[in-house]
Structure formats: C-alpha cells, structure tokens
Amino acid sequence: MDEQKVLQHIQEVLSGNQDSYKYLIDEYKDSVYNLVFKFCGNFSDAEDITSEAFVRAYKNIKSYNIERSFKNWLFSIAVNAAKDLLRKKKNIIASIDSSVFLEESEVQVQYSDESDNPETLLFNKDQAQDVLSAINALPEKYRIVIILRYMENLSYEEISNIILKPTGSVKNYIHRAQKVLSKSLESKNTSKVSKK
C-alpha cells in the first residue's frame, strides 16, 4: 500500500471512520503476525500479540508521526507488545518450532551483513533449523534486530526507528549477535562432525 493511501485512511480513522481502520488491519495484519511469530515462536502468542498491537495502535493513532513509515510504527508497537508478553512469561522458555515455521514460510535465512562481511551465507532447510534455534537462544535485544534485519530485510535506520535505539546501537547489536550465532553454529557443526 502506498503511504498516501495509508495517510488517507489514518485521517479517516481520526475522523471516526472505523471501517478505515479495518482496512489498515487487513493490509498489515499478515506482516505484523509474521514478525511477532518469528520473535516469539508460538502461533497462539503471535495471534494475541498481533491483536494487542492493533488495539494499541488504534488507541495511539493520534500520536502517529506522518514522517514515519506506518508499517514501521506498527512493527515498533508489535515488538513492544511481544516483549511485554515474553516478560510476563519469562519463566517459560519460548521456542521456535522450526519445522512448522519452515513449512509455513519457506524462508531462506540469510546470515551475514554484506557491509560487514563480503561473504553471504545462505542456509538450506536443514541448516536453517540450527540457525533458527540459535536465533531463538539469543538475548531479546539481539534476537529482534537479527529478525528485523535478515528475515524482514529492514535497513539499519528502519530498525532504529522500530526499537527506538540509535543506528550505531543497531549495528553493534547485529555485530554482537552475529558473533554469538557464529560461535553457536560452529559448536553445533563441530558436535555433528564428531558424532559421525
């Protein structure tokens, strides 16, 4: 959807037209759901978080800054809703069901940032399960930037706007997350080789 049409629907929502908000929900619900599912790894939680994100967005639509991408604004709300839910469930370890995730969205996980490392590594389906498991084990702040960068293909600036951190921090988080992922995957590969 183009930004002009989005702004038109937002103006209509502010004027009291709830049908325009339904249109925005229909337009963005899949994107928001996919993002939060990748973050929390649970279908039921992803549905709850998606609903919560749209409720929060509706309540706060007056504060939406038209200079900002509406999708990224929604992503920011969804990420915060996901963090809130995961904090409430902090005693329960959320895990990504890799096989279901892969069947649902035949995503090829790309790990590496071409600006930091000229070698781009693409993982096949078997390797992707290890990658998703390693991503899920990352601390929350690293996990979300990896998901936004490599699964949602967002720029550093877009990620910065979503997580409300400076671009330098985003790059730093991604760099640190890559190191942790690299060590984790090396360790898994070494143990697989030694078992053969």
Image (tube, rainbow, N blue to C red):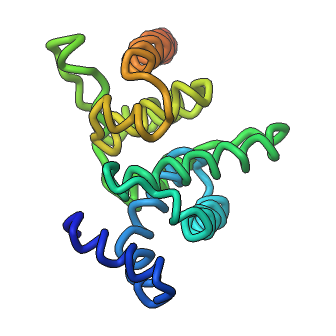
Q: In this view, does 98 lie above or below 6?
A: above
How many numbered circles are shown?
0
Residue 171 percent coordinates (x, y): 37, 17
**What residue appears at the point 40 percent right and 61 percent down from the top-left corner?**
104
For the N terminus, give its image quadrant: bottom left
Q: 64 or 187, which lies in front?
A: 64
192 with respect to 56 (left or right)? left
Residue 36 percent coordinates (x, y): 53, 53
Q: 160 or 143, which lies in front?
A: 160
Whether residue 2 is visible to the viewer of this picture, yes or no, is yes
Whether residue 193 is visible to the viewer of this picture, yes or no, is no
Q: In which quarter of the image is residue 52?
A: bottom right
For the C terminus, give its image quadrant: top left
Q: In this view, does 151 lie above or below 141?
A: below
Q: 188 or 184, which lies in front?
A: 184
Q: 131 or 32, which lies in front?
A: 32
64 with respect to 77 (left or right)? left
**What residue appears at the point 39 percent right and 73 percent down from the top-left corner?**
10
Residue 54 percent coordinates (x, y): 55, 68
Residue lying farthest right? Answer: 91
Residue lying farthest front? Answer: 15
42 with respect to 190 (left or right)? right
Q: Quadrant of residue 114?
A: top left
